[in-house]
Image (cartoon, helix red, strand yellow):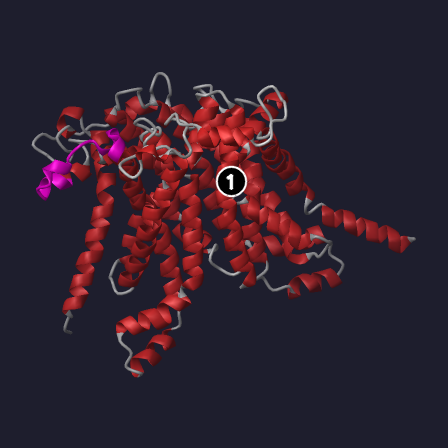
C-alpha cells in the first residue's frame, strides 16, 4: 500500500504538537526529581543526573504545610461533596424532567443561570454566615458550601439525561401503583448510572481542584486541602522549584488518575454541555 | 374528602423531590448572592450611599486595585483588571478555538489520535493552581523551557523571566493558559466532527467539491452549535480566571497581570474592604451573566 506524502506530514505535525504539549510536564517532573544545581541551566541538560525522591518526601512532610495531611483533607472534603449533591440533585433533576407545576421553566432557567455566577459573588456574605453558624474553618462547612454550589450544574446535567430516557417503563410502574420515590430509585436511578458516574467524576475533580473556596473558608494549616498547601509552599520572594514541582505532581496525580481510568465518563460529561437539553 | 387528601399527599411527595436541593441553594448560594448586591450600596458603616461605591472602585488608580486605568495604554500594562480580562479574551479565545478546531480536523486521519487528545486535555484535568506553577516555571529564565526554546532558535534577546516584567507578565500568562485550555475546544470539536454523517462528505466528493468548499459549506455550519458552546464556556473561563494568576504572579509585578476575580480577593484579603470587594464581584458577575444569558437563549431556541 502506498503511503501518501500528506499522511506523513499530518502525522509529523500532530505528534510534534503532542510532544510540545508534554514538555512543560516533563520539566516539572525533572525539577521534582533532580537537585537545583542540575536544572538551573535547563532541566533538559543531562551532564549530571542524580534523580531522587527526596523532594516528594519534603513536600509530603513539609513542617508548616504538610502535603500528606492536605491530601487526606482533600479526600475528606471531596468525597462527601461529590456524593451529597449528586443524590440531592438527581432527585430534583428528575422532578424537573417529569413533573409539571407552575413556574417550573422559570425556576429551571434560574438554576441554569446560577451555574455561570462566579464563586466571588457569594463568598463574602457566606463568610459571615459561616461565622455565625460556627462553621468557619471547618471541613463540614466547606463540604456544605461545595455541595450547595455543585447542585445547580448537576441538576442541569442530570435533567438533560433524564429527558432522553424513555418514560414507558415508569408509566407502567405508575399504573401498577408504585410511588414516585420507588420509581425513582428502583427504575430511573439504575438506568442513569452512566450519567451519575460522569457527574461524579467531574464534580469530584472540580472540588479536588478548587482553590478559592478553600482559601476563603479554611485557614488552619492542618485543615488545609492539598491545593492550599501547595500554594503556601511558595515563599514570598524565592520559588523553591523542587518543592513546588514535587507538590504539584502529588496534587495533580489524583485528578489525572481519575481521568485516565474513567476517561470515557469524563469526556461524556464534558460533551454533555453541547448536547441538546 | 379522600380525593382531596390524596391530592395533598401527592403534592407533598412531589415537593420532596425539590426541597432537599432548593433549601441549601437558597441558604448558601442565592441569599449570599443577593446580599452581595445589597452590600454594594452601603458604606462600611451601613449607610445607603447609592452608586458611590461603584464610582470609587471604577476611579481607583492604585494599580493593585485598579479596574480600568488606561494611562499606560497601549504601551504596556497595568491597564486595570477589567482591561486585562478583555485582553485575555481577545488573545486567548481565538487562539484556543481555532487551534482546537484545526487539530480536531487533522486528528481524524492520525494514528494514535486518542493519545494526543489525552495529552492535550490533561491541562483541563489538573488543578489550575498547578497550572499557575507550571506556567511560571516555563517562563523563568534558565530553568524554563520557553527561554530554552528561544535560545535554541537564536532569539537570545527574548530570553528573560517573562513573569517578572510588567510589559510581558500578562502575555506570558495568557499564552501559558492557551497550553492549559486548548484541550477543551479540541475535545468538543472532535465530538462534533464525529457526529457529522459520512454521507454528507461522500455526496460532496461526488459533486467534486474542493476541500475548502466542503469545510466552509458543510463542516463549519454543522459545527455551529459546538462553536457557540466553546466560545461561551471559554469566555466564562477567561472572565473567572483566578487560581492561575494567584499562583503565577499574584497580579504582579505592580498590578500588571491583575484580573477581576483576583482584584476582588485583594480588596477582601489585603484591603480588608469587603464593600469594594463585593462591588468588583458584581461587576464580574454582570459580565458572566451577559455570556450565560446569550448561551441559554441560543440553547433554548434550538
Residue that badge 1 annotates:
B285
- Chief secondary structure of the magenta portion: helix
Horizontal side of A162 relative to A58 (left or right) equals right
Q: Position of residue A42 (x, y in %)?
A: 14, 33
Horizontal side of B4 relative to A104 (left or right) equals right
Whether residue B171 is in magenta: the answer is no
Image point (37%, 66%), residue name: B220
Image point (28%, 43%), residue name: B175
Residue B112 higher or lower than A119, as above or below: below
Picture quadrant where residue A226 is located = top left
Secondary structure beneath dot 1 equals: helix
Horizontal side of B158 relative to A122 (left or right) equals left
Chain letter of disc 1 in the image? B
Foreground pick, B81 / A45: B81
Foreground pick, A23 / A235: A235
Horizontal side of B101 relative to B159 (left or right) equals right
Q: Position of residue A253 (x, y in %)?
A: 34, 37
Q: In the rendered image, is residue A48 in sight?
A: yes
Q: Position of residue A205 (x, y in %)?
A: 44, 41
Picture quadrant where residue A245 is located = top left
Q: Residue furthest bottom?
A: B207
Whether residue B154 is in magenta: the answer is yes
Q: Residue furthest right?
A: B1
Image point (34%, 50%), residue name: B183
Foreground pick, B85 / B161: B85
- Start and end of the magenta stretch? B149-167
Amino acid at each position: 500500500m502506498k503511503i501518501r506524502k500528506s499522511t506523513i506530514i499530518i502525522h509529523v505535525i500532530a505528534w510534534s504538537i503532542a510532544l510540545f504539549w508534554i514538555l512543560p510536564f516533563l520539566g516539572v517532573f525533572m525539577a521534582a526529581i533532580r537537585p537545583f544545581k542540575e536544572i538551573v541551566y535547563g532541566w533538559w541538560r543531562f551532564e549530571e543526573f542524580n534523580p531522587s525522591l527526596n523532594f516528594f518526601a519534603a513536600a509530603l512532610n513539609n513542617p508548616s504545610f504538610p502535603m500528606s495531611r492536605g491530601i487526606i483533607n482533600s479526600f475528606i472534603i471531596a468525597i462527601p461533596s461529590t456524593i451529597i449533591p449528586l443524590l440531592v440533585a438527581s432527585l430534583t433533576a428528575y422532578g424537573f424532567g417529569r413533573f409539571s407545576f407552575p413556574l417550573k421553566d422559570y425556576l429551571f432557567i434560574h438554576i441554569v443561570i446560577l451555574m455561570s455566577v462566579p464563586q466571588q459573588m457569594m463568598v463574602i456574605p457566606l463568610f459571615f454566615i459561616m461565622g455565625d453558624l460556627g462553621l468557619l474553618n471547618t471541613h463540614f462547612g466547606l463540604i456544605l458550601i461545595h455541595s450547595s454550589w455543585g447542585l445547580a450544574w448537576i441538576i442541569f446535567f442530570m435533567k438533560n439525561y433524564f429527558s432522553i430516557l424513555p418514560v414507558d417503563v415508569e408509566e407502567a410502574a405508575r399504573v401498577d401503583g408504585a410511588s414516585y420515590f420507588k420509581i425513582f430509585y428502583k427504575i430511573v436511578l439504575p438506568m442513569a448510572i452512566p450519567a451519575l458516574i460522569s457527574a461524579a467524576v467531574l464534580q469530584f475533580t472540580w472540588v479536588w481542584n478548587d482553590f478559592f473556596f478553600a482559601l476563603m473558608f479554611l485557614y488552619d494549616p492542618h485543615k488545609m486541602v492539598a491545593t492550599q498547601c501547595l500554594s503556601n509552599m511558595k515563599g514570598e520572594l524565592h520559588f523553591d522549584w523542587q518543592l513546588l514541582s514535587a507538590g504539584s505532581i502529588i496534587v495533580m496525580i489524583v485528578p489525572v488518575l481519575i481521568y485516565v481510568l474513567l476517561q470515557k465518563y469524563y469526556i461524556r460529561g464534558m460533551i454533555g454541555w453541547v448536547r441538546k437539553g | 374528602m379522600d380525593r382531596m387528601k390524596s391530592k395533598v399527599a401527592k403534592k407533598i411527595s412531589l415537593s420532596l423531590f425539590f426541597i432537599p436541593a432548593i433549601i441549601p441553594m437558597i441558604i448558601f448560594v442565592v441569599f449570599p448572592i443577593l446580599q452581595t448586591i445589597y452590600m454594594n450600596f452601603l458604606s462600611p458603616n451601613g449607610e445607603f450611599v447609592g452608586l458611590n461605591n461603584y464610582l470609587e472602585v471604577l476611579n481607583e488608580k492604585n494599580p493593585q486595585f485598579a479596574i480600568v486605568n488606561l494611562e499606560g495604554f497601549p504601551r504596556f500594562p497595568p491597564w486595570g483588571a477589567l482591561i486585562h480580562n478583555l485582553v485575555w479574551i481577545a488573545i486567548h479565545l481565538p487562539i484556543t478555538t481555532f487551534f482546537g478546531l484545526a487539530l480536531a480536523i487533522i486528528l481524524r486521519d492520525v494514528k494514535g489520535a486518542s493519545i494526543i487528545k489525552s495529552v492535550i486535555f490533561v491541562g483541563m484535568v489538573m488543578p489550575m493552581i498547578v497550572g499557575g506553577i507550571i506556567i511560571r516555571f516555563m517562563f523563568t529564565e534558565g530553568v524554563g523551557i520557553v527561554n530554552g526554546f528561544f535560545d535554541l532558535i537564536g532569539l537570545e534577546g527574548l530570553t528573560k523571566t517573562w513573569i517578572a516584567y510588567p510589559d510581558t507578565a500578562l502575555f506570558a500568562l495568557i499564552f501559558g493558559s492557551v497550553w492549559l485550555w486548548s484541550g477543551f475546544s479540541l475535545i468538543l470539536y472532535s465530538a462534533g466532527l464525529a457526529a457529522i454523517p459520512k454521507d454528507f462528505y461522500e455526496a460532496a466528493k461526488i459533486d467534486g467539491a474542493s476541500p475548502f468548499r466542503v469545510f466552509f459549506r458543510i463542516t463549519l455550519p454543522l459545527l455551529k452549535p459546538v462553536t457557540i458552546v466553546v466560545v461561551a464556556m471559554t469566555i466564562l473561563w477567561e472572565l473567572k480566571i483566578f487560581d492561575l494568576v494567584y499562583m503565577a504572579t499574584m497580579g504582579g509585578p505592580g498590578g500588571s497581570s491583575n484580573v477581576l476575580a483576583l482584584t476582588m480577593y485583594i480588596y477582601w484579603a489585603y484591603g480588608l474592604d469587603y464593600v469594594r470587594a463585593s462591588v468588583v464581584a458584581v461587576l464580574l458577575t454582570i459580565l458572566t451573566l451577559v455570556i450565560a444569558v446569550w448561551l441559554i437563549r441560543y440553547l433554548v431556541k434550538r
